[in-house]
Image (tube, helix red, strand yellow):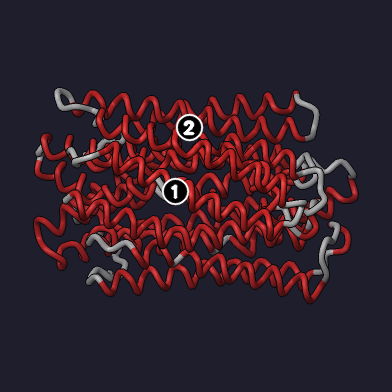
Amino acid sequence: MTGGTARNSVVLAGWTLVSRATGLLRVVVIGAVFGPTWFANCFQAANTVPGLVFSLVAGPVLAMVVVPGLVGALSDGGPARAREVLGRVTGWVVAVSAAISALLVVAAPVLAWTLTRGIPDPGERSLGWWVSMLLVVLVAPQIPLNCVAYLGLSAQRARDRFALSAAAPAVENVILIGAVLLAGWRYGTGMEIDRVPLGMLLVLGVGSTVGVGLHAALQLFGAARVGLLARPSARWRRDPDALAVTRRLSGAVGVATLPSVALYALLAIAASVPGGVFVVQMSTSVLFALSYLSARAVSMASLPRLSEAAHRRDMGMFGAMWRQALAYALTAGLPPLVMLAILAGPTATVLANGRLEHSALVGPLAACLAVVAAAQLVTGLSDLGNQALYARLEDRVPRTASRVTLAVTLLLGAAALLVPPGAARLVWLVAAILVGELVAGAMVLTRIRRITRPERFVDGHALRATLLAAAAMAPVGAATWWLQETYGHGNRLGILAVLLGGGALAVGVYGLVLRRAWGPRRA
């Protein structure tokens, strides 16, 4: 079991690296092609709307709820029963998401208004409203497509298959990158809002939606490979197992919805700074990329086995699995914290390209990335706690935590409006995300501690070994920073080469110290 969790975590992290790297590249390309313009703000903000609204039908929490249900169905009735339950859950999810997609089209004018209030010139604000509204309409079909993709992903993870489900999002990113490059080549780069033609908007909006459609198709192919491809059915009310899953999904809506609402509000505030949406979105992209490569990869790999232990009501097994997952999550999450905190400046220099290369946004991005260094670990640990609670079919604490997090994040985000529009405002917005995640993590992990008593909550030996290994990385990170400052001379390729070499050496040192300090594995 230990080897299976570790192996699945590595597989998830490896393929997630591919998909998240393309996600980061997508943001870099958008910034490089469109620059710090009001149009870039409108496009980036509008393109995030489907992902945020997708959270109204549980979003990423979809897998947390569906996987335990499928694990139980597989245990009780085999693949045939699991397909039956999944088909009925799919029918409910598709019906709800299609209705929400239609509502999004109706609400497009209001959403566009909120996304463009930060544009000071009335004429540009009016044009930005039209552009944002059209883009929201073009990307609205992505909501049911995202739901289908996550259902296919859940089917694969319920059978302990992780590679394709983690790699498939890369296709979505590659298609959008191609659409952005095509639009820039055909219509020009760095355009202000009053020069953007209709054809460019169609290329961007349709290209983005086609990418999500291909992603969903790949996830369905993966579900078919593990024998869990299911036809949508409207009979979820007649199936007690499917009805239980849909009710838990309804109850879990706030867990993903409320943080997404907070992120939408932060993006709307960031839109008051030219290029501000790029900085906040790049920061959150790095945040999620690192968390999914480290602690979140462990949490997703642990969910099937935690669900199995919970289904058997074996608290000894559940406690052992929790300690193992927590140890792996800390082991995976501390290296990015140390290295990004030290190398935030050169990392921001590498990420700001094209129209942003000489922009004043590089400094704010570096400060935001330093905040992200801590936020990625906190987010991963909070997610691990949520996965463990959903494995036990508990959703009360995650729901409460999400509500408190929303209040904290919105309060701090609104306070950013008191800060002059510029670098300080953007850093404040990203710091609001960190504080919100800290609150959520504290609430969720406190509940896990109560559940696991009298079992140990954490493997102290593994924790000490991990902290020692992370401390050993710091001198390597400092030396890497000095080398790029001394010999980089503003050359992005040179800086990137130094960062990659220093990062590889730091990971090697981390692994060697960890291996010596950890010694024999402990549950």
Q: Is residue 155 left or right of residue 32?
A: left
Q: Residue at x 12, y 63 (%)?
A: 78
| Marks 1,2: beta carbons within 8 A | no
Residue 331 position within the rendered picture, expressed as x and y whole percent measured from the top left: 36, 41
Crowdedness near tag 1: few (<14), some (14–19) or many (≥20) residues, C-alpha within 10 Å: some
Give the residue pinned by disc 2. 437
Q: Residue at x 31, y 36 (%)?
A: 395
Crowdedness near tag 2: few (<14), some (14–19) or many (≥20) residues, C-alpha within 10 Å: many
Position of residue 376 relative to residue 74, above or below, is above
The earlier-in-sequence mark between 1 and 2 is: 2
Residue 294 position within the rendered picture, expressed as x and y whole percent measured from the top left: 41, 47
**Dot in front, 1 or 2:** 1
- The Cα atoms of the two marked residues, 1 and 2, are separated by 26 Å
Residue type highlighted by circle 1: Val
Position of residue 7 relative to residue 416, above or below, is below
Quadrant location of the C terminus in the rendered image: top left
Q: Residue at x 50, y 47 (%)?
A: 288
Label 2 residue SS: helix
Q: Residue at x 32, y 67 (%)?
A: 232
Visible residue check, residue 58: no
Residue 480 position within the rendered picture, expressed as x and y whole percent measured from the top left: 60, 45
Q: Is residue 217 left or right of residue 140?
A: left
Give the residue pinned by disc 1. 507
Q: Is residue 91 left or right of residue 364?
A: left
Position of residue 51 relative to residue 463, above or below, is below
Visible residue check, residue 249: yes
For residue 419, which quarter of the picture?
A: top right
Residue 438 position within the rendered picture, expressed as x and y whole percent measured from the top left: 46, 28
Residue 54 marker: none
Label 1 residue SS: helix
Residue type highlighted by circle 2: Glu
